[in-house]
Image (cartoon, rainbow, N blue to C red):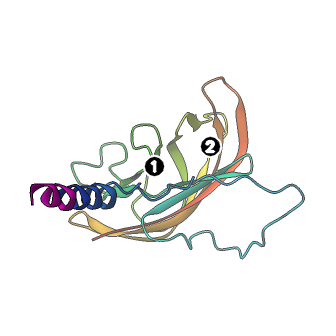
């Protein structure tokens, strides 16, 4: 009888171990490499990102930041609008697959829709080139009690940590905080 229990116990143990040790689902890269000679159709609307997503295209390669995305807006004449008390200020922060390394931030001095100068832009190891101011266009902005929506596009020249300039960097964002 004891031998029979050992076989059943061993069989059940193997079933539990095999079913409990499943590999994680595959993680696909968020960067795409352009196909030479192919131009994607441009519908002219770069704000159609999924919610809580920032996309940036540098030298034909698109990087998506969609692990976390949020923004903060300080309205005019509030104590927190330190950089621009008369117009307010807005900052976006987003992370990609590796939160410690895939970081995106964009700041501009305003708190409404329109086109504004970028005062700070960082995407991984790229920063804004201060010799050529970038622009951000805000198409939707609502913010109250750390909730709101921010949509828009941006364009700037960025510089890597070796001093190389990457011209005509473009991107878009669609952030909704609930």
- Residue stretch in magenta: 1-8
Tell me what residue is drawn at x 36 percent, y 42 percent: 83
- Which numbered tag is attached to residue 97? 1
Question: Closer to the camera, 156 or 25?
Answer: 25
Which secondary structure dominates the residues rendered in magenta?
Answer: helix
Q: Position of residue 127 (x, y in %)?
A: 56, 36
Query: Quick one: label 2, few (<14), some, or many (20+) residues within 10 Å?
Result: some
Q: Is residue 166 above or below residue 76?
A: above
- Which numbered tag is attached to residue 130? none
For label 2, the residue is 133
| Quarter of the view holding residue 52 | bottom left
Locate the C terminus and report the quarter of the image it occupies: bottom left
Q: Position of residue 10 (x, y in %)?
A: 22, 55
**Tags 1 and 2 in contact by the CB under 8 Å rule?**
no
Q: Position of residue 112 (x, y in %)?
A: 42, 66
Q: Is residue 65 magenta?
A: no
Residue furthest toward the top?
Answer: 162
């Amino acid at each position: 009888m004891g031998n029979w229990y050992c076989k059943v116990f061993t069989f059940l143990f193997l079933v539990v171990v095999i079913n409990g040790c499943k590999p994680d689902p595959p993680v696909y890269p968020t960067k795409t490499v352009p196909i030479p000679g192919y131009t994607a159709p441009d519908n002219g609307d770069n704000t159609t990102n999924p919610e809580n997503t920032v996309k940036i295209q540098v030298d034909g390669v698109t990087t998506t930041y969609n692990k976390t995305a949020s923004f903060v807006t300080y309205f005019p004449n509030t104590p927190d609008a330190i950089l621009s008390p008369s117009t307010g200020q807005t900052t976006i922060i987003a992370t990609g697959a590796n939160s410690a390394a895939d970081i995106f931030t964009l700041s501009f001095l305003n708190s409404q829709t329109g086109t504004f100068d970028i005062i700070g832009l960082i995407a991984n190891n790229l920063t804004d080139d201060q010799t050529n101011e970038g622009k951000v266009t805000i198409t939707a902005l609502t913010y109250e009690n750390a909730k709101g929506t921010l949509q828009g596009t941006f364009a700037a020249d960025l510089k890597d940590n070796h001093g190389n300039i990457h011209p005509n960097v473009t991107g878009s964002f669609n952030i909704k905080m609930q």
